[in-house]
Image (cartoon, rainbow, N blue to C red):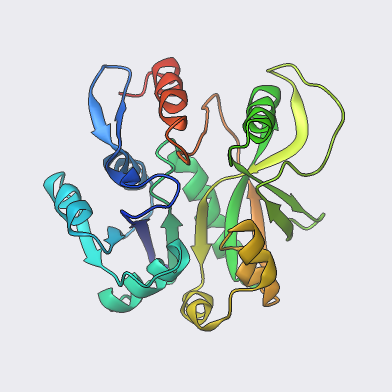
């Protein structure tokens, strides 16, 4: 099965304008843009045939081409990353069997997260879409709870059934727990990692579906598949000592830079 990775990136983010061009300093002190770090993460994935940046902004296009990325221009009207991936798939004339959406705000995504996702899609022909989930340790969960207490939208959490079929995704911390956890403790909460793998048929149908009430309330694009009765497969991945965080707000920049320092990521 051929695999295409698309990195959707837009300039006009409501919460963080110009986010793809925000610079992150690695452990060696070198600053590279968020979009470049996302592209480097995608390029490290094994078994992928093509990696492209999909954008609607010339500033992102020029920045991406400067570090060697292939870029495809997509309409400004794309409402989210999934719609942009669908537009990119059409614009490229691609015939890939699996399309991966590695969102441009997740530069710490380890290559094995995506490799596990691709393997799950190959092994689960009934799945329309698959996405990774990572069990939170106490440090990650406490970070989510601190964000919510401060009124910030942090990471997304996921709940799924015994067959790993998604039941819900939320920007709130679910499931609810009154327990307290030390940094190294396992918790019952799973962090949804912002990567998706789609069957082309489901991806191409997606833009024609209306935005449902859950997607509108949560602002989570994957809920549109669920509201249409699609099968979303959750794939549990292992951190293997790696920390993971998404860049959602300007306050996340020092968090990610600290993690890069601790993990020795240049």
Q: Nearer the viewer, residue 158 or 95?
A: 158
Expressed as whole percent of the image width and height from the top left, the position of residue 66 reads: 12, 46
Can you tell which quarter of the image residue 261 is in? top left
In the image, 112 versus 34, the foreground residue is: 34
Residue 76, compared with residue 20, is above or below; it is below
Point out residue 52 in the picture as x, y percentages from the top left corner: 28, 59
Number of residue marks: 0
Left or right of 169 in this view: 123:
left
User: Can residue 152 be seen here?
Assistant: yes
- For residue 36, side relative to residue 218 (left or right): left
> If the image is split into quadrants, where does the C terminus sit?
top left
Q: Residue furthest right?
A: 178
Task: Classify residue 101 as left or right of residue 177.
Answer: left
> In which quarter of the view is residue 211 placed?
bottom right
Residue drawn at (33%, 56%) of the image = 10
Q: Would residue 65 be found to the left or right of residue 163 on screen? A: left
> Looking at the image, can residue 124 be seen?
no
Occupied quadrant, residue 83: bottom left
Q: Position of residue 135 (x, y in %)?
A: 68, 36
Residue 222, position as x, y percentages in the image: 59, 63
- Kindly identify the residue that appears in the image at 26 percent across and 17 percent down: 29
Q: Is residue 16 above or below residue 1?
A: above
Q: Quadrant of the N terminus?
A: bottom left
Name which residue lies at 73% across and 57% down: 168
């Amino acid at each position: 099965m051929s695999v295409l990775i698309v990195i959707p990136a837009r300039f006009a983010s409501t919460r963080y304008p110009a986010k793809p061009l925000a610079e992150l300093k690695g452990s060696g002190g070198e600053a590279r843009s968020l979009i470049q770090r996302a592209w480097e993460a995608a390029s490290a994935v094994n078994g992928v045939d093509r990696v492209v940046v999909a954008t609607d902004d010339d500033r992102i296009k020029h920045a991406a081409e400067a570090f060697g990325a292939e870029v495809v221009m997509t309409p400004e009207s794309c409402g989210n990353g999934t719609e942009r991936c669908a537009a990119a798939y059409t614009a490229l004339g691609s015939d890939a069997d699996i399309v991966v959406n590695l969102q441009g705000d997740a530069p710490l995504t380890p290559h094995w997260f995506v490799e596990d996702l691709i393997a799950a899609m190959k092994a689960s022909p009934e799945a329309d879409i698959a996405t990774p989930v990572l069990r939170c340790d106490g440090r990650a969960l406490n970070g989510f709870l601190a964000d919510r207490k401060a009124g910030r939208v942090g990471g997304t959490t996921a709940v799924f059934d015994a067959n790993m079929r998604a039941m819900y995704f939320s920007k709130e911390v679910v499931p609810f727990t009154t327990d307290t956890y030390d940094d190294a403790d396992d918790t019952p909460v799973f962090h949804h990692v912002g990567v998706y793998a789609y069957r082309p048929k489901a991806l191409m149908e997606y833009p024609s579906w209306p935005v449902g009430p859950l997607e509108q309330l949560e602002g989570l694009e994957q809920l549109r598949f669920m509201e249409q009765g699609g099968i979303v497969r959750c794939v549990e991945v292992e951190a293997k000592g790696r920390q993971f965080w998404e860049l959602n707000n300007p306050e996340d920049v020092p968090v990610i830079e600290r993690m890069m320092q601790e993990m020795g990521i240049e």
